[in-house]
Amino acid sequence: MSASRRSGTTDELGPQEPERDGADLLAALLDGMDAALCAFDADGVVTHWNREAERILGWTADEAVGRQGFAGWAVRTADAEEVQERLLSAMQAPGRQVYEFALLTKEGGRVLVRTQSAAVRGPDGKPAGVYCAFSEVHAQIDLERSIALSEALFEDASWGVVLVDADLRPAVVNAHAARALGIGRTAVLGRPLGELLAQGVEELESALTHVLAEGSPPAPAEMWVTVRTPEGEKRRCWWSGFLRLASPLAEEPVPLGVGWLFQDVTESKQTEQEASLLRFRTNQLHRAARAAAECEDPAEAAVVHLDFALAGFADHALIDRVAGGSVRDGEGPVRLVRAAATPSGAPGPSLPAGRAGLPVRYAEGHPALQCVDRIGSVRASAGASSPERTREWAAARQWPADSVHALCAVLRSRGRTLGVVTFLRGASRTQFERADAMYAEDVAVRIAAALDLAGASERG
């Protein structure tokens, strides 16, 4: 038997020798445990030694069982008395006694171990010996570090940590993730992700399913989502990493779920996008200026500026000139005449409206007229209306039927108002923002300069 002493007629820590079945069962149980186990009788003689103890120190049960303590083989001679005293002191102490000391391997190396010792009582209730479990300290420290890391991630981490089970539902959520999701840590547990996210849930669930099936991806992923919160929906960008979790106790990996770690990078991504958009628009203005310089007709140059401005900015555009060419501030109501427009039915370059000079019949309060009165940009939107109401809204303003958002910028040159340029977006685009108005005003300055030259040529 590998785990216990077989010589002698009695064993103070086990059954009598004839009861071989019980002793063999005890040996099998001890050998099957992950912890290193040994035992001493009341005199300090080793009576049990399992396979994990053999693995750590290299001494077999036949070499260990029957020795007097650890002196001369498993500890240095200088430390033997102190180690023996600590181990046997457990017989007189209640509960478990925990110590750390160095043991010697069979090859002569030193191993720092942590021991837990407890007294074993005989039939008469008196101390009969000591059972001792020990493990390498670095293994214990690794376990404690793992536990500490887990607790820190779920309590103090500055990024979101969510454990998602195999059904793609949150099982554990840290405080940061709960704040990002706009819900309490316990309220989020077990809920479908679709109840937490208004947009982006399909992409997230696809990533989680892939990780469960194929394993962790090689790099984090950028994911845009819309979070449902008590204050309303919020668009966020999360830099996400995924880890497949498997049970360490099973011989074959058994998926437990996915560890999802994310960090909110919305502000940096928006700044990056804004900078990229600004570079693009600046480049478009430069390209338009070069192309317009090649035009012999200033009116054609104005249309070129309009076409370059449309790219990535709007779906349609209109240029309405003031009847008579221009008007100075405070000269009263004005009439606008269509000068150029993009095709409303198909893509293509903007087309001049000809020289008929028929005024556009805009109703009072039209955004283009407001733009002239205010001498500044005006934004308008149909909002979240039905398609039918949106078409009615656009028709009432004499814009293409698919128009949902509008931005009007005044055309000014040398203190005079020459007209209005109107940019229109469809339902697939967002409303015009302040940065869009600034860009439209830059374009308007260039168009106004070209129209002023065209007017001067006509007058000449």
Image (cartoon, rainbow, N blue to C red):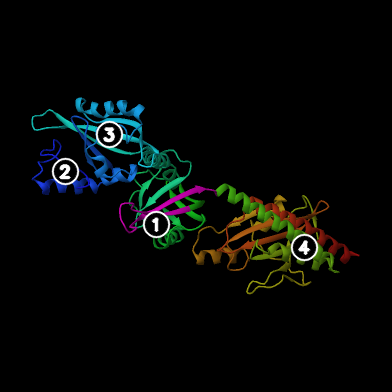
Looking at the rendered structure, which numbered label has been put on residue 116? 3
Instruction: Name the amino acid type tagged 3.
Output: Gln
Instruction: Name the amino acid type tagged 4.
Output: Arg
The quarter of the picture where residue 446 lies is bottom right
Q: Main secondary structure of the magenta part?
A: strand
Residue holding disc 4: 287
Viewer-nearest of discs 4 and 2: 2
Mark nearer the N terminus (4 vs 2):
2
Mark nearer the N terminus (4 vs 3):
3
- At a point 75% along the width and 59% down the height, the residue shown is 285
Q: Count residues near mark 3 (Cα–Cα under 10 Å), then give few for <14, some for 14-19, many for 20+.
A: some
In the visual, does 359 lie left or right of 274?
Answer: right
Residue holding disc 1: 194
Q: CA distance from mark 3 to mark 1?
A: 49 Å
Q: CA distance from mark 1 to mark 4?
A: 45 Å
Instruction: Name the amino acid type tagged 1.
Output: Gly
Mark nearer the N terminus (3 vs 1):
3
Residue 264 among magenta residues: yes
Residue holding disc 2: 6
